[in-house]
Amino acid sequence: MGPIPRHGDPSRGRMCPLGWLGVASLCLGTLWAVPAEKRMKVDKPKAELTLYENLDLGNYEVTLDNYGDILDLSNYEELYDYKDLVSKIEVGTLAPRPKDRKPLPGLGETTAGTPKPQPPSSAGPVPPAPIPGQGELLYFHAPAGLHSCQLCLCLGTSVYCDDTELEQIPALPPDTAYLYARFNRIEAVRAADFSGLEKLERIDLSSNSISWVDADAFRRLPRLQELLLPENRLPALPELPRSLVHLDVRHNRIASAGLRPEAFRDLKQLQFLHLSDNQLDFIPVPLPESLRSLHLQVGQVLALALILVLFLALVLVLFMVLVLVLALILALVLVMVLGLVLVFLLVLVLFLVLALVTVLFLVLVLFLVLVLVLVLVLVLALVLFLVLVLFLVLALVTNNNIRTMHEDTFCDRQEQGQIRRALEDIRLDGNPINLSLFASAFSCLPRLPTGRFS
């Protein structure tokens, strides 16, 4: 191994200047980059100001005439070329484009599907539009001849005219099956009211003022099953359809002469016959075998009469007790006054004449008061008695008064062992008939009739 040179490697001396030269160039580049960024920030506002100097901002009013001079949009596509960056959008309409374009109608014109508005007329108020799905509910006081759905409420095949102040039956839809016209002021039923309504099954005209029904008003209804006419003023029954199942004519004025002979013989489907509170004096026969319920009782009229009798008797008793109490009070007052007068007479002889006059006057007044009270009580009792008698007479005259029945009213004497199992409800209570005298008339029934047996 040779000797190590004392002054080092000569290439090491050449590397030192090159290093210093690189460091110096790096520092100069850094110093040059900082002023360049500042010059870019300063030059950018100047360029924007130069761009806006070309616009005349003093007269910047855009109109249709100078729009192209102020804003130049011709180069927008060159400056912003999106090419394939935005997908193509095809715009169309849902409905096909019409071949012939027609101008829109003016203010005074209407289209074919739009009705032309009419000025209000003086014929009457315009009814409100019907509510979809809820029938048509309109006004009650309407001219005669209007459709029932313009007067009542129509739901499906049912027509409701309850409490609408009707004075006659309105025209009904041809598919009407159920009619309810209760609590109105209908006075008559005509044959034309139900003409052609072959689907009618139920007619309810309760609580009206019906006093007349045409003979064939209901006879031509082949499907009628329920006829309800209670609380009216019917003097007679019209002809009835053979399909009838339920007949209710309670609280009317039907007399025995108002029933046709054998009025119920051909009603082979009749099950409920309610004739209570009328003016019948015998049970209508023959009755169909299908009958299940027969009501001929005297209803609440006599019961109300009895209640009224008890009430009036109680009032009279209370009145007599009140009169007696008043008489006793007046007698005590009179005795006290007389005693005081005697005392004054003993003490003050000078006032004797005045005391006697006072006593006579008080006695006269008390006597007149007692006479007046007794007269009022007697008059009131007489008036109440007359009212009670009149009420009882009307109750007896205007109600059923069945006193007898035939032996074959319910049972056929010629048929041995007959049992009418269907007829379970017969009411004759309130009538003067003694049912115990006609035992053979209901021997075939499963239950005894309701009524008096003594």
Image (cartoon, rainbow, N blue to C red):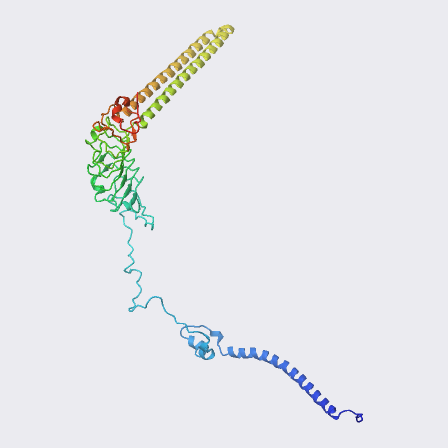
Residue at the far front: name it. 417
Q: Which of 250 and 165 is in front in this view?
A: 250
Q: Nearer the viewer, residue 9 or 64?
A: 9
At x 40% / y 19%, what residue is drawn?
A: 318
| 435 to 193, vertically: above or below | above
Q: In which quarter of the image is residue 375?
A: top left
Point out the image quarter for the C terminus.
Answer: top left
| 182 to 156, vertically: above or below | above
Q: Quadrant of residue 360?
A: top left
Point out the image quarter for the N terminus.
Answer: bottom right
At x 30% / y 31%, what residue is drawn?
A: 425
Task: Find residue 140 and report its horizontal and vertical position in percent.
Answer: 30, 42
Task: Find residue 270 and report its horizontal and vertical position in percent.
Answer: 25, 36
In the image, taking residue 268 as reference, residue 35 lies left or right, namely right
Number of marks? 0
Residue 177 visible, this angle: yes
Residue at the far bottom: name it. 2
Residue 398 visible, this angle: no
In the image, taking residue 189 as reference, residue 299 lies left or right, namely right
Q: In which quarter of the image is residue 247?
A: top left
Task: Find residue 74 and report its horizontal and vertical position in percent.
Answer: 43, 79
Task: Find residue 406 and report its horizontal and vertical position in percent.
Answer: 22, 25
In the image, taking residue 40 as reference, residue 298 lies left or right, namely left
